[in-house]
Amino acid sequence: MNVEITGLTRRFGRTTAVAGVDLRAGPGVFGLLGPNGAGKTSLLRMMATAIPPTSGRLLLLGHDPLRYGPRREIRRRLGYLPQSLGYYRGFTVREFVEYFALLKEMPAGRIPLAVAAAVDRVGLGDQSRAKLRTLSGGMLRRVGIAQAIVNEPELLLLDEPTAGLDPEQRGAFRALLRALGQGATIVVSTDLGEDGGAACPQVALRDRGKIIFHGTPGDLTARGEGHGTGDAPLERGYSAVLAAARP
Amino acid sequence: MTATSAPARSGPVTRSPGLAAARLLGLELRHNAMLWMMPVAIALFWFTAGRKIMATPPLWSLRAAGTQLSGVLAFASPVAGAAAWMGSRENRRRTTDLVSITARPRPGRLLAIWAATTCWALVAYLACVIVVYGVTAHQATWGGPLWWPAVVAAATLPALAALGLAAGSLLPGRFTAPVVAIGAFFVLALSTQLIQGSQSYWQISPIVTGAWDSPPDPEAGTFYAYVPDLPIAQVMFLTGLTAAVLGALALPTGSGLRSVRRSAVAITAAGLLAAGAAVTVTGTGRLDAHGMIAIPALHDAASDRPLRYTPVCGHTAIPVCLNPAYASYLPATEAALAPVLGQIAGLPGAPARISQAAATYQQGRGNGVGIRLAGSRISGAPPVFHMLLPIQLLGPVLTTPELVRQERSITGPSIVASVTGDGPGASQAQHAVTTALLMAAGAVPPHLPSPAAPTTSRSGPPPGAGSGDERYVVPPPGSPAYAAARRFAALPAAVRHGWLTQHLAALRAGRISLVQLP
């Protein structure tokens, strides 16, 4: 298992963002669904080693991220796309991805090829010399994905990766996810049920800090038969589970 | 986006940290704010100080001191501001999460930013030094470049970059950089306000090049070797400060392994120790006799020895000889003194040579510095008259006509007085003969306008006051001495010269009265 989470809790002051989550995930694409404020981003940030948990146990790629040495090893094999991507306006696409390849301590000799491959995979090969300040929101999102995958991560964490992508790009992105998921664990956080259903064999639905559903998209769809609201079957399952979990 | 697979990993993983660090530095160099501040720093240097430095006499000591002082002040704001801007980049651009989850520790990222900022700052400063020193090399008539002042200013830049980076990373914000830029300038400029004499700890400030509140000392590298004691202490302080700040940036928890933090603690402690030691030894400094700050713990006695040189001499009736570093002043000095020297050449006891000598310095109250001629005014057989050029007296820099006027009104009368024996306690006849010879040489006008307003007087402190070189006071018009002087000056030159040849010994002995003068 690349991700083993037991009783994970994270509090910000008096607010509990993540409340006693248990989760195990091996190679493949794992969808983390839920409405705004469900604690998806906090869970992902803990898995990305950006913030420590308040309590609970977290094992990533077989290592404990609370210790410096293992944490550094995890970070070398980690890819992360935050919900809000910060970027350096003067960098070109290639430079930005190269910068993160260097920060991830990739072997220097491999970096040029890896950067070119990552930029190509997100469809920005012909924009590789463009300054980031000249790119559209969707293109910037793809740059963010490129920096996350440049080191061929074994654990890839994507927070709202399809925000700003057009339908064609979303399709291409799902194909990319499936390819990456062959050997790595990919956790995709989204509030759009369709994204999770289309690319993730396994999904978890979170609400108010807790996981209220864990299964396949088919199972989630089945929960919506005859219940719930929404246009698509998965959306109906999503709303039905949420409605059932709420008092 | 394509679902193609990534290039296959091949071969063993060799991280080659040196190559990776070089690539990271390359990226930071391309995107460092200091790159854009370089023209600003160079323009500040040139327009606030560069032209002024180039207008100073072409002496290495003056040009080097000017380059240090102005270089530090001109570069302080751009370097500290650029470093603070870069240090706050992650926060301003909201990349904190993204970069903080990477394997490279935060100190490594900050070190790359600091190195890039420092590199561009040094390149810009080096360009300024190359221009100033290159032009000086063409203009200077003797001596070689003094590197220590340039090294002090160069060592200031990494320290400013480290301080700016620390401020930017610890207090990230849009206004941090401008506040740091302005603050750096004022801290440096105000750091010298507390200097009181040559034993002040505050001399550690990198804008101090010698005795504070005095213009740069021209003796260094001309008559005596440059004493690098203060620059050594300043470089030690700046290096220690840089190490301490950079080490402190690696101290926060989460910055790295315990061994890394232990190293950071050691570097910070060593830096503080070096900086503290430098400040301590600077407090023991004293102004030496040659105008430089000597620090006993760092002093090399070999640097006290006078420099050997072959003077450059002119072709006046009595040759005027200057230190070769001042060769450009020879024509003006000759022009100023030739008429006076023509009056006394050949007289018994007249000097065989007028020779420029070194000045001696003495720390006065507060930051006051007394400067006078080292040794006696006349010495040797045949006698040599020793003089100081006005530039050695730390007065304002003079134009050539001002220099001629000053030498004619101060040095000329001193030379004549040394022949006639005029001075405190001299007879009225000696005073009258001195005045007559100066009138004949054109150094004193033969008709003064009124007794109340003599043209040469002691009204106000003359340049170089306290140096022993003071303006000659002629007898008041209407007085018997003045009348005798006019009468003696009106004699034909040959008659005057003949009378002096015959009676100079008696005149010097005070045995000639006013009425005995022809």
Image (cartoon, rainbow, N blue to C red):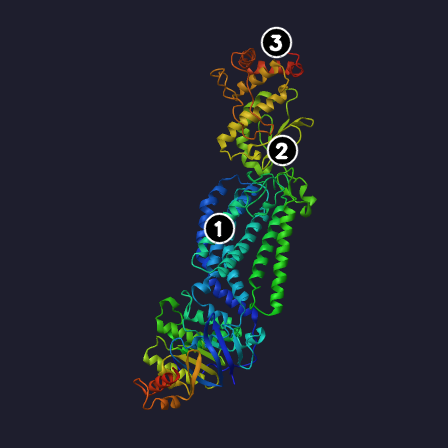
Residue type marked 1: Gly
Residue appearing at x 50%, y 33% in the figure: B398
Q: Which amino acid, by three-letter code, is at mark 2?
A: Ala
Q: Is residue B181 above or below residue A197?
A: above
Q: Vertical placement of A109 versus A183: above or below?
A: above
Which numbered dot is residue B357?
A: 2
Q: Earlier in the sequence, mark 2 or mark 1?
A: 1
Answer whether residue B118 is visible to the viewer in this image: yes
Q: Mark 2 falls within which chain?
A: B
Across and down, in percent, residue B254 comes to: 55, 69
Q: Is residue B47 above or below residue A224?
A: above
Q: Is residue B73 visible?
A: no
Gap between marks 3 and 1 measured at Cα: 73 Å
Q: Which chain does the residue under circle 1 lie in?
A: B
| B382 to the left or right of B489 | right
Label 1 Cα crowd, 10 Å radius (few <14 / some 14-19 / many 20+): some
Q: Element at badge 1?
A: helix
Residue, disc 3: B516
The residue nearer to you, when weighing B335 against A176, is A176
Q: Quadrant location of the C terminus of chain A? A: bottom left
Residue indicated by mark 1: B183
Q: Could you tell me which secondary element the residue under label 2 belongs to?
A: loop
Closer to the chain start, of discs 3 and 1, is 1
How far is disc 3 from disc 2 in space, using C-alphas? 37 Å
Residue lying at the far left of the rendered structure: A231
* Mark 2 or mark 1, whichever is nearer to me: 1
* N-term-proximal mark, 3 vs 2: 2
C-alpha gap between disc 2 and disc 1: 44 Å
Mark 3 Cα shell of 10 Å, populated few (<14), some (14-19), many (≥20): few
